[in-house]
Image: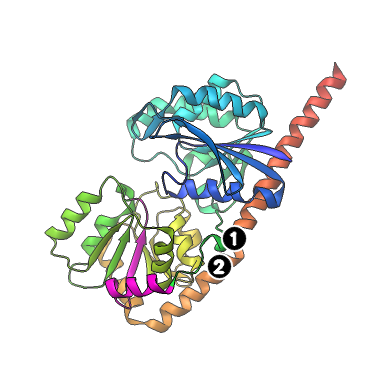
Amino acid sequence: MLRVLQFFKTSLPETMGGIEQVIHQIALGGGRHGYATDVLSLSRQGRAPAIEQDGYTLHRAHRDFEIASTGFSASAVTRFRQLAARADVIHYHFPWPFMDLVHFASRVSKPTLVTYHSDIVRQKLLLQLYRPLMERFLGQMDAIVATSPNYLATSPVLTRFSDKVSIIPIGLDRDCYPAPAPERLRHWRGVLGERFFLFVGVLRYYKGLHILLQAMQGVDFPIAIVGAGPIAHELEAQARQLGLRNIHFLGGVSEADKNALLTLCRAVVFPSHLRSEAFGVSLLEGAMHGKPMISSEIGTGTTFVNIGGETGLVVPPSDPAALRQAMTCLWTDAARAQGMGEQAGARYRQYFQADRMCAAYARLYRDLAGRQSRSAARDEGEG
């Protein structure tokens, strides 16, 4: 069985972002598709013993400090070398500049691939400093994976390396989202009523939640905002300033409660307005639950998940009026909302199931490992 090492700055269950979910889903699928997975990440809690987690092994190195959302760790270099020595394939997740440094410091000789989750959008000055390292790192990869054709077509970085890019859409396993207990459904109906819009995600600058709050002026739709993050207090202050009475900041919730909210909501609203939002795993969770979606056209995978006029509505970014109009449409037209939700569920089943994603990665892993074996055999024969 092939052994794969996945490396990223964070992992479940310590942090709950979209990339962490992707890493988890890929690792979960290994048993069915012929690969075993080690996951190495950094942790605020310091180095901890390796743990078996849902069929794969999670390793955590102490995060020493962080600059511009980039974690650094001296111990991670040693741990990476140890795990890479026994791996057949190294699987990186971009962006994380420290990862590039570890790759070169470790002089990796194993087959390598990177899943390219997002361009670096906000830190323009730091990007100029990082660009030479980034281009050298991507140039050394044996394969690069984009998560949607939309992102490949619009990323100036990916288009430079298009000869080595494969497209493997993100997938989720419906069985990881068990049906919510009746008491949790009753609880959330009592809190939010029978109809509400739902946002799920880390509360970051590019999520467009300030636009959502602006859009709610003059209407009174209940909105549940699930997640924590660096701009939570700023958003709560904005809601108070605007006099919004029906915005429910729920913070982080359990998986059981998240499933209950996804089951009950009228639609998933996802107003991300910058390219930092490369795919939208929360959108995909909505589709998986058969919910219509509202998202913005930002030239990324959000519009690969949500097809405007079919699985939901797509509006211009940073346009509160257009967002309000889309929400009003789904709020007042139950039949249209239901029909779009059904098409969203069908699209999930066709393109975005975890087993489909894991099978594609398994083929790529085997291909990369096979290339190295053939190359080694040729070198031995020539010697």
Q: Amino acid at mark 1?
A: Gln
Q: Is residue 274 left or right of residue 180?
A: left
Whole-percent x, y for residue 17 in the image:
42, 48
Q: Is residue 324 visible?
A: yes
Residue occupied by mark 1: 353
Outermost residue toward the right? 381
Q: State if disc 1 and disc 2 touch (CB < 8 Å).
A: no
Q: Which residues are magenta?
A: 182-202
What residue is rendered at 83% in x and 25% in y?
A: 378
What residue is rendered at 46% in x and 37% in y?
A: 95
What residue is rendered at 39% in x and 73% in y?
A: 183
Q: As displayed, is residue 41 above or below residue 12?
A: above
Q: Amino acid at mark 2?
A: Arg
Q: Earlier in the sequence, mark 2 or mark 1?
A: 2
Q: Is residue 313 visible?
A: no
Residue occupied by mark 2: 347
Whole-percent x, y for residue 147 in the image:
54, 50
Q: As displayed, is residue 245 above or below residue 88?
A: below
Which quadrant of the figure contains the C terminus? top right
Mark seen at residue 168: none
Measured in 3D between alpha carbons, the distance from the residue under mark 2 to the one under mark 1, in whole angstroms, is 10 Å
Q: Is residue 367 left or right of residue 134?
A: right
Whole-percent x, y for residue 14 in the image:
42, 43
Secondary structure state at the residue bearing disc 1: loop
Q: Badge 2, how many Cα within 10 Å: few under 14, some, many 20+?
A: many
Q: As displayed, is residue 121 above or below residue 200?
A: above
Asked if the stretch drawn in magenta spans residue 28, the answer is no
